[in-house]
Image: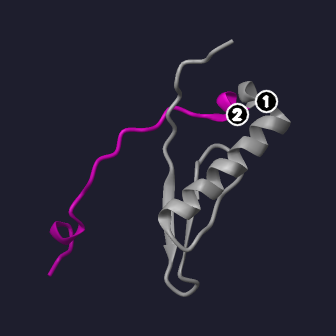
Amino acid sequence: MERSPMNVPVYLEYDEEQKRFSPYVPDIPGCGEGETEAEAIEDLKEALRLYIEVRGIDRAIALIRPQPEVRELDLSKLAHV
């Protein structure tokens, strides 16, 4: 059975000390790492493939929560100077 695409957010952090990228999907266990962003994303994809292979795609989908809308506030305007 073919499934429709399901895009999930990928968060990417960079560790300046380690000089490595670490991407992750907030709701699904697993993460990746790599010296470049592309390498780290490929590592994350492999981790997600393994999770889906073991737990199943339905379990992975069930873990995903709707993403909240994001708003920004300018903290400098809130400071009493």
Find out whether the residues at labels 1 and 2 contact each other: C-beta distance under 8 Å: yes
Residue closest to the far top: 1
Q: Is residue 29 visible?
A: no
- Magenta range: 60-81
Residue closest to the far bottom: 17
Residue 56 locus on image (x, y percent): 79, 30
Amino acid type at mark 2: Ala
> Where 19 sits versus 66, above or below?
below
- The residue drawn where x is 78% and y is 44% is 50
Amino acid type at mark 1: Gly
Which image quadrant for residue 52? top right
Q: Residue 60, which numbered label?
A: 2
- The residue drawn where x is 58% and y is 84% is 18
> Where 28 sits versus 11, above or below?
above
Type of secondary structure dominating the magenta stretch: loop
In the rendered image, the quadrant that contains the N terminus is top right
Residue 39 locus on image (x, y percent): 56, 63
- The residue drawn where x is 19% and y is 71% is 76
Q: Secondary structure at mark 1?
A: loop
Q: Is residue 6 left or right of residue 1?
A: left
User: What whole-number distance in Å separates the C-alpha atoms at marks 1 and 2?
Assistant: 7 Å
- How is the protein colored in the picture? one colour
- 5 or 80, which is in the foreground? 5
Magenta residue check for 52: no
Residue 41 locus on image (x, y percent): 55, 56
